[in-house]
């Protein structure tokens, strides 16, 4: 069942965010990511704070009183300089989507995406942006199946 974030699920949210970061670490071919000792507390607080300041939402998929999936999204605003080179619609930005490895392949991610897309649609967003770690082919395949496509690429070179 999907419900909006409540503080009673804070520890579950922390667990999910750490699980995602551990997964990212395991696939990071550049070996640039880390799981800092303060990650669990500070990253969770940062995400929840940004949701509160940018018209955001956090939806949880709850089974047996435990959050086993989450999606966080915000609404990005533009400044006067963005309009110089971009036709700027109001856009939603999915900043986190995690489904616990023990509950994947049950359609939970798809349900969470639909919930967030509905929220963005209600807020009159014209598009949704999602940043995906390049080595996370599972996520890229998921988002592609959901109708998302690449528009920009960040390129890096280790020196």
Image (spheres, rainbow, N blue to C red):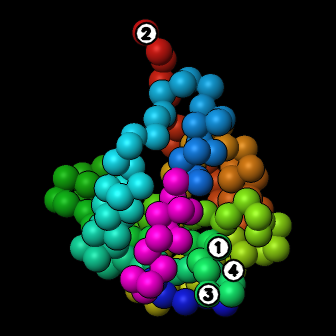
Specify the quadrant that holds the N terminus: bottom right
- Disc 4 residue crowd, few under 14, some 14–19, many 20+, Cα 10 Å: some
Was residue 16 drawn as part of the magenta stretch in this picture? yes
Q: Quick one: 120 or 37, which is closer to the camera?
A: 37
Do the numbered discs 4 and 3 sit on residues whose CB atoms are within 8 Å? no
Q: Quadrant of residue 83?
A: bottom left
Q: Which mark is residue 65?
A: 3
Q: Is residue 68 left or right of residue 90?
A: right
Q: Which residues are magenta?
A: 6-18
- Judged by its main secondary structure, the magenta piece is helix
Residue of label 2? 159
Disc 4 versus disc 3: distance between alpha carbons?
18 Å
Instruction: Pinpoint residue 104: horizontal percent, then vertical percent.
Output: 77, 65
- Dot 1 falls on a residue whose secondary structure is strand
Q: Which one is closest to the eye, mark 1 or mark 2?
A: 1
Q: Going by the picture, which residue comes out furthest to the top? A: 159
Residue of label 4? 111
- Residue positioned 76% across, 69% down in the render: 103
Instruction: Pinpoint residue 119: horizontal percent, then vertical percent.
Output: 49, 85
Instruction: Pinpoint residue 151: horizontal percent, then vertical percent.
Output: 55, 48
Disc 1 versus disc 3: distance between alpha carbons?
9 Å
Q: Is residue 148 left or right of residue 70?
A: right
Residue of label 1? 68
Sequence-first tag of 4 and 3: 3
Disc 1 versus disc 2: distance between alpha carbons?
39 Å
Instruction: Pinpoint residue 126: horizontal percent, then vertical percent.
Output: 47, 74
Do the numbered discs 3 and 2 sit on residues whose CB atoms are within 8 Å? no
- Residue positioned 38% across, 43% down in the render: 37
Q: Is residue 70 left or right of residue 146?
A: left
Q: Quadrant of residue 43?
A: bottom left
């Amino acid at each position: 069942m999907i419900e909006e974030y409540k503080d009673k699920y804070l520890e579950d949210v922390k667990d999910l965010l750490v699980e995602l970061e551990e997964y990212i670490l395991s696939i990071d071919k550049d070996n640039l990511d880390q799981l800092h000792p303060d990650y669990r507390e500070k990253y969770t607080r940062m995400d929840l704070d940004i949701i509160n300041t940018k018209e955001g939402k956090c939806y949880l998929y709850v089974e047996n009183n435990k959050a086993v999936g989450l999606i966080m999204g915000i609404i990005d605003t533009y400044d006067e300089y963005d309009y110089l080179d971009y036709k700027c619609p109001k856009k939603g930005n999915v900043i986190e989507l995690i489904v616990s490895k023990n509950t994947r392949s049950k359609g939970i991610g798809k349900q969470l995406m639909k919930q967030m897309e509905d929220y963005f649609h209600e807020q009159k967003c014209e598009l949704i942006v999602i940043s995906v770690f390049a080595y996370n082919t599972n996520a890229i395949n998921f988002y592609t199946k959901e109708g998302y496509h690449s528009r920009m690429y960040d390129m890096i070179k280790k020196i």
